[in-house]
Image (cartoon, helix red, strand yellow):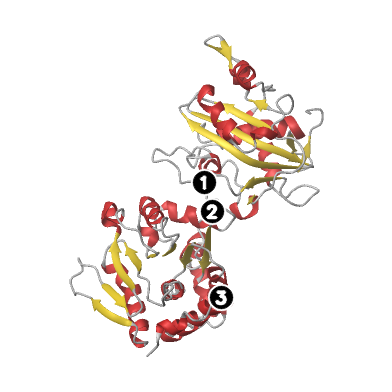
């Protein structure tokens, strides 16, 4: 029997490591190389973790091991146990029970279970309490409203891809007061789109502070000792279409087809940016349905998108105060370098957008007609590595908000647009469409205007198959 309270006598990192050693031994968990990488990130103090697993990759066992690592005993100043509440949330009660059983068996083996309730009926929760003051419950997201009235210290969201984005948001709110943690575990197959989207987002720096990992089938070397090149994995790869193989066994989202800007990647282009010496510029697309304003800084040959104001069904008088609230507003050069779509020069109700910005906050805006294809080519070129620097020339601040798209398909914020702006579908006998769908593109177009104004456009010279810069656009 383990005396849990003795484990908290170890301070700081040593105490946590001691608890992890004991509870993983009780669980019988020995992480392989891929699982160990996830464990190292988790031990560093991350609060939000997404583990996407391929078939038989061991995602459930790993997620339970990492959850147990955060369920260590806590005592007050008098050495008395402090109560903690943890949830295992599934699409229904039944699907949360496998992970609960892993937890129960490990704690029971160590003599750490004080009481338990595990009824056979699939419509009731399972509950256990520990000898050191923790309570662990299964919950169901089938009624999301019931998740809203508690504060919990940690959540294991199992089969997360089968649950809704609203459930994730509810659980995020439930751990806010306690500064608790959430582990999302699931597979991509038959999952909802938000899960794959979050997997992509969290593989790069992000405002939510989340981390995501793909745990491929071949990482389970106990079953596939040859790893990626195990004969059975190679045979599976020959059997399945490439994108389905990577989704089912590689735990990687299928490639998104038809994107206007396919070069964008969260892992490559989103990172933590610091304000550099020099001015900041505004790039504006003033459509009423979506009014986008980007704060962009030129850093040599690079462009850093530091912040953005992104509002639906708004006019300049609504947007300008939000722009002024940005921490980067005071660094904006109001005379030079700011751009707006040519539509901003048009007069509606006697004043153009250019005039409104000048009258309200003294910002001078440049505008010039730029063909849409020039905007697209310029953004794509500067996001790619096909340049003399050999790396992208545009980066986006990790602090930019990046919620999921709105229910009607509109982008909720600027970065959404890269996954939403598409070419129209075409039939087998139809030629390639020349104009993309004019939706979810306002921020990208604003960025394109600024890049063309600042660095000049690019064009593809078919005879040389080379992308080059055009001069004289400063």
Asked if the residues shown at circle 2 and circle 3 are in contact, with their CB atoms under 8 angstroms apart, the answer is no
Q: Position of residue 299 (x, y in %)?
A: 76, 42
Tell me, for residue 162, which label it has, or none: none
| Quadrant of the rendering where the C terminus is positioned | top right
Distance from disc 2 to disc 3, alpha carbons, whole Å, reads 29 Å
Whether residue 298 sits left or right of residue 289 in the image: it is right
Whether residue 455 sits left or right of residue 293 in the image: it is right
Q: Position of residue 125 (x, y in %)?
A: 24, 68
Disc 1, SS: loop
**Which residue is under mark 1?**
402
Q: Earlier in the sequence, mark 1 or mark 3?
A: 3
**Which residue is under mark 3?**
13
Residues packed near mark 2 inside 10 Å, few (<14), some (14 to 19) or many (20 plus): many
Above/below status of 7 relative to 257: below
Whether residue 147 sits left or right of residue 461 in the image: it is left
Near-viewer residue (26 or 341)? 26
Tell me, for residue 201, which label it has, or none: 2
């Amino acid at each position: 029997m383990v005396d849990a309270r003795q484990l908290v006598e170890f301070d700081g990192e040593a105490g946590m490591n001691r608890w992890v050693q004991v509870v993983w031994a009780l669980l019988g968990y020995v992480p392989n190389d891929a699982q160990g990488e996830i464990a190292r990130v988790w031990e560093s103090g991350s609060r939000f973790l997404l583990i996407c697993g391929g078939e038989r990759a061991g995602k459930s066992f790993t997620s339970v091991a990492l959850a147990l690592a955060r369920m260590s005993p806590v005592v007050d100043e008098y050495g008395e146990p402090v109560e903690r509440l943890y949830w295992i949330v599934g699409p229904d009660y039944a699907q949360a029970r496998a992970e609960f059983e892993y937890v129960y068996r490990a704690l029971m083996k160590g003599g750490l279970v004080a009481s338990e309730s595990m009824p056979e009926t699939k419509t009731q929760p399972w509950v256990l309490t520990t000898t050191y003051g923790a309570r662990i419950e299964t919950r169901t997201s089938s009624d999301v409203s019931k998740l809203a009235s508690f504060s919990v210290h940690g959540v294991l969201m199992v089969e997360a891809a089968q649950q809704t984005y609203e459930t994730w948001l509810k659980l995020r709110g439930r751990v806010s007061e306690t500064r608790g943690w959430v582990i999302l575990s699931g597979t991509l197959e038959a999952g909802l789109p938000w899960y794959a989207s979050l997997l992509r987002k969290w593989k790069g720096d992000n405002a939510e502070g989340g981390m995501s990992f793909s745990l491929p089938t071949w990482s389970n070397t106990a079953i596939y000792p040859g790893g990626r090149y195990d004969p059975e994995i190679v045979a599976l790869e020959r059997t399945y279409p490439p994108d389905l193989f990577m989704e089912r066994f590689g735990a990687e989202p299928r490639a998104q087809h038809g994107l206007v800007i396919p070069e964008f990647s969260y892992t490559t282009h989103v990172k933590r940016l610091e304000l550099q010496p020099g001015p900041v510029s505004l790039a504006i697309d003033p459509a009423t349905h979506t009014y986008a304003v980007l704060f962009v800084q030129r850093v040599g040959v690079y462009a850093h998108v530091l912040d953005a104001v992104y509002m639906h069904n708004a006019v300049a008088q609504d947007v300008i105060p939000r722009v002024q609230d940005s921490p980067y507003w005071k660094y904006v050069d109001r005379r030079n370098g700011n751009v707006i779509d040519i539509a901003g020069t048009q007069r509606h109700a006697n004043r153009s957008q250019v005039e409104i910005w000048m009258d309200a906050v003294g910002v001078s805006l440049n505008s010039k007609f730029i063909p849409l294809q020039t905007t697209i080519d310029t953004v794509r070129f500067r996001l790619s590595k096909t340049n003399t620097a050999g790396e992208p020339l545009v980066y986006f601040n990790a602090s930019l908000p990046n919620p999921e798209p709105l229910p009607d398909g509109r982008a909720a914020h600027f970065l959404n647009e890269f996954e939403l702006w598409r070419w129209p579908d075409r039939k087998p006998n139809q030629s390639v469409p020349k104009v993309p769908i004019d939706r979810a593109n306002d921020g990208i177009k604003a960025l394109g205007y600024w890049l063309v104004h600042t660095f000049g456009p690019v064009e593809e010279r078919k005879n040389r198959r080379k992308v080059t810069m055009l001069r004289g656009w400063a």
